[in-house]
Image: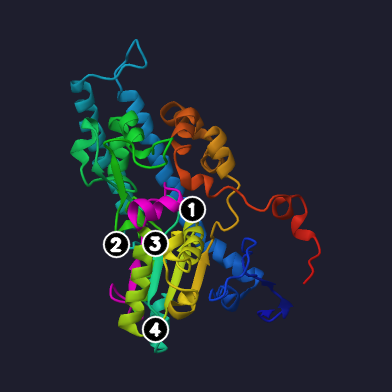
Amino acid sequence: ASCGKSGAPSQQISQQAMPPMRRKKGISASASARAAKAICPSELSAIHEKDAPTKKRFQTYLAVFVSMLAVRWLLSPVQKNPRSKPDVDSKGQLQMVFDDFLAANLQPLWDRAFNGTQHALEESSRVGHQLKKQNARVKHPVVIVPGFVTSALELWEGESCMKKNFRQRVWGSASMARTFFADRDCWQKHLQLNPQTGKDPDNIRVRSAQGFEAADNFIATYWVWSKLIENLADVGYDGSSMSMLSYDWRLGYEYLESRDGYFSKLKAAIETHQKTSGEKAVLVSHSMGGTVCYYFLQWVVTDAKHGGGGGGKDWVERHVHSFVNIAGTLLGVPKSIPALLSGELKDIAVLMPQIGDLLEQFFGRRVRKNLWNTWGSLYGMLPKGGDALWGSGADLGETTD
């Protein structure tokens, strides 16, 4: 491959390494190698330039969020005992003030930032629209598996402090921030899992939202899947040819099936799409969703008597056309280690170091650590492979066939 007129060789994106495993008959190789493209440095620079406005918007939203934390702190009643909670009147007043602040400051900011740019790619320049003009049409059904923290979570059962939020989102929406500010301890209690069982605490049920709206945007405006959905819609995809299978990303993988029947639902969705369309499905995942899909591909070919899906050894070949893995966590994520050990939020600290004090005051490391240690998913994303993969210079070693 060459770069423009210069003819200089470009860098090749190679297939992401898969965890060492014994190849099972009937499981096809990932299609990502076939889809790999050569990207020139100039093209890569252009991509970064296009991403710059998105990064600036994210920093703006984070700054507004921190400002709300500051307002929450300034408006909190002064107490002699820091562990005591405000009385009902104070909390009610605080809730009113926060709601007014949200309506008067945050919403206008979002409106200004996204006025005319909610669909950042105009129809004439969208990839999907360009493909439509080239007569691209729906062929393989698409099944989307979101990543870590990007699916909204809803309350289905809770304690008295949270009953008013029945079926409201406690994660992934503006109401999440409102609930956090009103009673942080209550919010945390309903997001954590039982540390002994890894499942629901007593009298608390929080479940993933469903449908495309579960993970198309995070907190309404920070897009996750909405652009891909929009471009696929340009060439004719809709709810009959495309599905999003969101899940409770806090759970360990085995509990996704035993508690929610998630893998059975994913299997049924793929089979239904193939039956109605006559074509194999394309499985698209992001982040933790890559590991969830990898677990699913092993589960679905395992006999039911051994706890698997009982699809038969050739189920994947018969139903899955390709697996598109976007930034998957197949080899783990190094930052899961400090998250579990100390509750560190390195990403936010690097992005905006000035928010450190406020973050520690309202959502300190000990609080974060205690919450995150109940999430089995984080343990499933610990790095795998040891020094052979993660050691210094491991990527420079010679390989043999």
Q: Nearer the viewer, residue 397 or 57?
A: 397
Q: At which x and y percent is residue 215?
A: 36, 58
* Spatial separation of the CA atoms under disc 1 and disc 2: 27 Å
At 38% across and 42% down in the image, what residue appears?
A: 199
Mark nearest the camera among 2 and 3 is 3
Looking at the image, the residue that sits furthest to the bottom is: 135
| Quarter of the image where one finds residue 94 | top left
Residue to which mark 4 is pinned: 279
Mark nearest the camera among 3 and 4 is 3
Q: At which x and y percent is residue 248?
A: 37, 51
Q: Secondary structure at mark 2?
A: loop
Residue to which mark 1 is pinned: 55
* Spatial separation of the CA atoms under disc 2 and disc 4: 22 Å
Q: Which mark is residue 263?
A: 3
At 59% across and 79% down in the image, what residue appears?
A: 34
Question: Where the N terminus falls, by quadrant?
Answer: bottom right
Residue to which mark 2 is pinned: 211
